[in-house]
Amino acid sequence: MKAFGAALASCVLFLAVSVVLGQNQNPNKSPTSAAPKYDPAIYAELQRAPKKARERANPLENDPDAVAAGAILFEQHCAECHGKSAKGTRKAPSLRAPEVQSATPGTLFWLLTNGVVRKKMPVWSKLPEPQRWQLVR
């Protein structure tokens, strides 16, 4: 059960990184589940989070129910582009990249809230704040 919780937490973290991840989909090809080639430049958006945002702590960090809720939210809102295991697809990059895994909870929350519209990452500010935190590890 602990391993399942850890896996769900990882998926939640990966969703937050979705905002940062760029999308290099070719409009002439249909999206597949194949992960895109690793490109560290895709994750540069993580560096744009303001200091105040980066320093925010996840208020749900120690809430086991938040992990389970985050996994459901990931499946509903993120898996379509980032893949069920968050390894990335042709539509969106992997959320398992070191850049995402080492990002602070506040950085991930900021990215979820603001999106990266030019890279087709939606703005999730309409998702209630507690749900956005559930998506962050």
Image: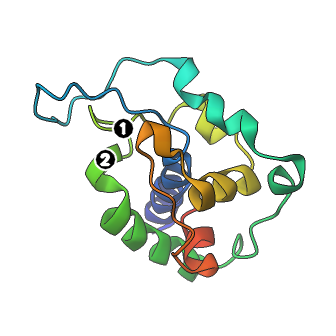
Q: Say which residue label 1 marks.
A: 92
Q: Nearer the viewer, residue 68 or 30?
A: 30
Instruction: Give the colouring mode of the picture.
Output: rainbow
| Lateral position of residue 123 relative to residue 92, left or right | right
Q: Say which residue label 2 marks.
A: 81
| Lateral position of residue 17 relative to residue 34, left or right | right
Q: Quadrant of the C terminus?
A: bottom right
Report the amino acid beneath label 1: Ala
Report the amino acid beneath label 2: Cys
| Lateral position of residue 51 relative to residue 116, left or right | right
* Crowdedness near tag 2: few (<14), some (14–19) or many (≥20) residues, C-alpha within 10 Å: many
- Image: 54 above or below 4: above
Can you tell which quarter of the image residue 78 is in?
A: bottom left
Q: Is residue 137 visible?
A: no
* Crowdedness near tag 1: few (<14), some (14–19) or many (≥20) residues, C-alpha within 10 Å: many
- Image: 128 above or below 122: below
Residue 12 spot, x, y in % from top left: 51, 59
Q: In percent of the image, x 27 and y 29: which residue is there?
A: 25
Task: Check disc 1 and report its element: helix, strand or loop.
Answer: loop
